[in-house]
Image (tube, rainbow, N blue to C red):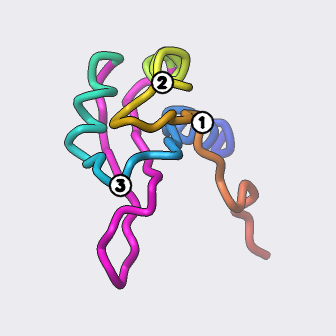
Amino acid sequence: MFSTQMARRVASVLFISRLSFYTTATKLEKLFSPFGSIEEVKLIKDPRTQRPKGFGFVKFSSEIDAQNALKSMNCRIVDGRLIFVEFAKTTNPDNTTS
């Protein structure tokens, strides 16, 4: 049961790559909000310089909204850059410890 809940949670998170360094979290939210309710937008920054690294995550409250956003936004040009959108992947899908 836990694994299906975890899979559903990850399925509503999109990974957006090749973002312009001028793209902000606010702009990402505006771009993706027409597809549904957004729970969180995270733009990854270099911890030392605070400059964006060119990728981020958008978490939708619905898996269907995330799928629609992926279909519409993948391979679109945003701030002069061709962006790629895909479902976020977990680094450790098996969280069991013994």
Res. 76 mark: 2
Name of the residue lying farthest toward the front: 80
Q: Nearer the viewer, mark 3 or mark 1?
A: 3
Answer whether labels 2 and 3 touch (C-beta < 8 Å): no
Name of the residue lying farthest toward the right: 98
Give the Cα separation between the discs numbered 2 and 1.
16 Å
Q: Quarter-wise, where is residue 43 in the image?
A: bottom left
Give the Cα separation between the discs numbered 3 and 1.
21 Å
Q: Which residues are magenta?
A: 36-63
Res. 21 mark: 3
Relative to 21, say whether 6 is above or below: above
Res. 62 mark: none
Relative placement, left or right, of 19 versus 23 is right
Camera-side residue of 20 and 91 = 20
N-terminal of the two: label 2 or label 3? Answer: 3
Which residue is at 59% across, 44% downward?
88
x, y percent for residue 33: 27, 24
N-terminal of the two: label 2 or label 1? Answer: 2
Q: Is residue 44 found inside the magenta-colored segment of the image? A: yes
Which residue is at 74% across, 72% downward?
97
Q: Which element carries disc 2, helix, strand or loop?
A: loop
